[in-house]
């Protein structure tokens, strides 16, 4: 994971922690920021999962499982 992605995840985690521990209600702006943070987190996860390393690792695991003989 890149330094930039790690920094974004840290910021999202800190924001989520503040939202969870804060007992006051959220304003519309906070909902908007939370929604944007969740969308950014989803985009980062999508990028990581669809990256070449993950796809090739999963392809290797599936190929190995299909070529294994039982018995």
Image (cartoon, rainbow, N blue to C red):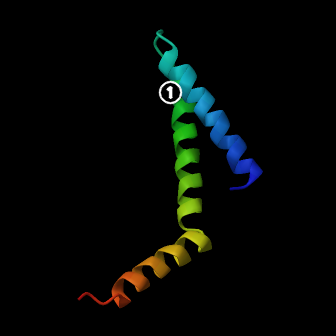
Q: Quadrant of the N terminus?
A: bottom right
Residue at the farthest right position: 3
The residue furthest top is 24
- Taking the view exactly as shown, the residue that stands out farthest to the left is 71
Q: Position of residue 28 (x, y in %)?
A: 51, 22
- Could you say where residue 21 lies in the image, as x and y percent from the top left? 50, 16
Q: Nearer the viewer, residue 45 or 32?
A: 45
Give the residue drawn at x 53%, y 59%.
46
Q: Quadrant of residue 54?
A: bottom right
Depth check: give the residue in front, 54 or 33. 54
Describe the element under mark 1 as helix, strand or loop: helix
Quadrant placement of the C terminus = bottom left
Residue 61 pos. (x, y %): 44, 77
Q: Is residue 7 left or right of residue 39?
A: right
Q: Which residue in the protein does label 1 denote?
A: 31
The 10 Å Cα crowd at callout 1, few under 14, some 14 to 19, many 20 or more, is few
Q: Is residue 50 above or below residue 30?
A: below
Query: x, y percentage for residue 53?
Result: 60, 72
Asked if 38 appears above or below 52 in the picture, the reply is above
Q: Residue at x 37, y 90 (%)?
A: 67
Displayed quadrant of residue 30: top right
> Where is 11 relative to 5, above or below?
above
Residue under the image location 75 percent in, 49 percent down: 4
């Amino acid at each position: 994971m890149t330094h930039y992605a790690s920094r974004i995840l840290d910021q999202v985690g800190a924001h989520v922690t503040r939202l969870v521990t804060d007992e006051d209600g959220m304003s519309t702006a906070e909902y908007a920021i939370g929604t944007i943070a969740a969308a950014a987190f989803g985009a980062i996860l999508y990028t990581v999962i669809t990256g070449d390393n993950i796809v090739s690792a999963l392809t290797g695991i599936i190929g190995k499982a299909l070529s294994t003989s039982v018995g």
